């Protein structure tokens, strides 16, 4: 479970924003997008990346909750233009598709 009282968690939460696929395309072209599965807490994943929590990141990568955004998903996002949320943890931009009305974290 994530410690939501962590100051970095609060900072990342405040920096998380809705974004269009069009705005994310340059980051995709640079290979800097990480896809976060809808069931994962976007901010908690960003926190783990920021804090270099290798065990958590490895578990999400292995479990498919975190992945480098691939071309097939990029094509799908371009075609559908869904609601996306993103947060920057340099050099990465973590992005997640949100269903209408779903909680941010």
Image (cartoon, helix red, strand yellow):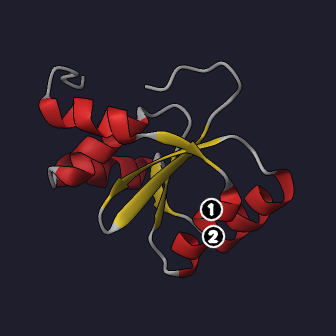
Binning the other alpha carbons within 10 Å of mark 2 as few (below 14), some (14 to 19) or many (20 upward) gives: some
Residue tagged by mark 2?
25
Q: State which quadrant residue 90 falls in.
A: bottom left
Q: Which mark is residue 23?
A: 1
Q: Are marks 2 and 1 in contact (CB under 8 Å)?
A: yes
Find the distance from the CA under tag 2 to the CA under tag 1.
6 Å
Numbered marks: total: 2
- Picture coordinates of residue 22 (x, y %)? 70, 63
What residue is at 23 percent from the left and 22 percent from the top? 4
Q: State which quadrant residue 13 falls in.
A: top left
> SS of the residue at dot 2?
helix
What residue is at 55 percent from the left and 64 percent from the top? 69
What residue is at 37 percent from the left and 55 percent from the top? 88
- Picture layout, residue 30 above or below residue 51: below
- Picture coordinates of residue 99 (x, y %)? 69, 29
What residue is at 43 percent from the left and 25 percent from the top? 105
Q: Residue furthest bottom?
A: 30
**Which quadrant is the N terminus positioned in?**
top left
Q: Which mark is residue 9?
A: none
- Picture coordinates of residue 82 (x, y %)? 75, 44
Binning the other alpha carbons within 10 Å of mark 1 as few (below 14), some (14 to 19) or many (20 upward) gives: few
Judged left or right of residue 4, residue 38 is right
Judged left or right of residue 79, residue 104 is left
- Picture coordinates of residue 19 (x, y %)? 60, 48
Question: Which sits in the foreground, 65 or 100?
Answer: 100
- Picture layout, residue 2 above or below residue 22: above
Judged left or right of residue 90, residue 76 is right
> SS of the residue at dot 1?
helix
Question: Which sits in the foreground, 39 or 64?
Answer: 39
- Picture layout, residue 79 above or below residue 17: below
- Picture layout, residue 13 above or below residue 101: below
């Amino acid at each position: 479970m994530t410690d939501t009282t962590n100051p970095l968690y609060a900072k990342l939460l405040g920096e998380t924003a809705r974004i269009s696929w069009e705005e994310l395309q340059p980051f995709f072209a640079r290979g800097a997008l990480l896809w976060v599965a809808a069931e994962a807490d976007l901010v908690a994943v960003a926190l783990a990346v920021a804090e270099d929590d290798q065990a958590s990141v490895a578990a999400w990568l292995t479990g498919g909750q975190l992945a480098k955004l691939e071309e097939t998903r990029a094509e799908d996002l371009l075609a559908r233009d869904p609601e996306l949320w993103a947060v920057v943890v340099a050099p990465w931009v973590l992005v997640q598709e949100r269903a209408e009305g779903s909680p941010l974290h």
